[in-house]
Image (cartoon, rainbow, N blue to C red):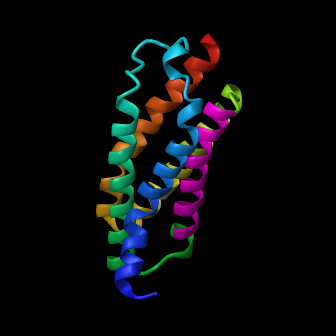
Amino acid sequence: MNKTIKNLFYLLLPLITGSIIGFIISSFIDYPSLIKPPLAPPSILFPIMWTIIYILLGISFLLYKNNSQDNKTINLVYYTSLVINLSWSIFFFIFKWYFFTIIVTIILLFSVIYLLYLFFNHYKPAFYLNILYLLWLIFATYLTIGIYILN
């Protein structure tokens, strides 16, 4: 694969896969009908936030790949956390496995914390670009637990 195609792959993978999952789950989304905990945002905020997060995630991985010595652990944690992230929506919206998604969210949260730790030690700009992701996951953990308890 030439460098331009690799760079586009690194940059766009989170956004494209997130969009595909969004399309797959779109007819199953019942967020407006769920009882939500305090501070739950309106539905429109989620695609906006995830688009921003996926763009930042792609940029961070692209910058890491182009400016740091390649690290197999970072690659594994990055791709694994992306798969976990994408699977959450399927478990939550299609299968309605609310308790299971709490577990998935916590696993994702710890995998992203580990990814940020690795980015911090290998290429700090990638770390900084993912702080929003970490904050959003902490909030998503609160929402997931709240939705499970209330529904």
Along the viewing direction, whichever of 123 and 46 lies nearer the viewer = 46
Q: In which quarter of the image is the C terminus?
A: top right
Q: Residue at x 66, y 34 (%)?
A: 94
The magenta segment: 75-94
Q: Quadrant of residue 42 in the image? A: top left
Q: Which residue is drawn at 50% across and 43% down?
A: 22
Q: Which residue is drawn at 40% across and 88% down?
A: 2
Q: Which residue is drawn at 31% across and 54% down?
A: 129
Question: On screen, 69 above or below 41?
Answer: below
Q: Is residue 147 visible?
A: yes
Is 85 within the magenta?
yes
Taking the image as shown, residue 130 lies to the left or right of residue 83, namely: left
Question: On screen, 25 above or below 149?
Answer: below
Is 81 within the magenta?
yes
Percent across and percent down for residue 111 are 56, 51
Q: Quadrant of residue 121 in the image? A: bottom left
Along the viewing direction, whichever of 19 and 88 lies nearer the viewer = 19
Question: On screen, 55 above or below 38?
Answer: below
Percent across and percent down for residue 130 are 36, 51
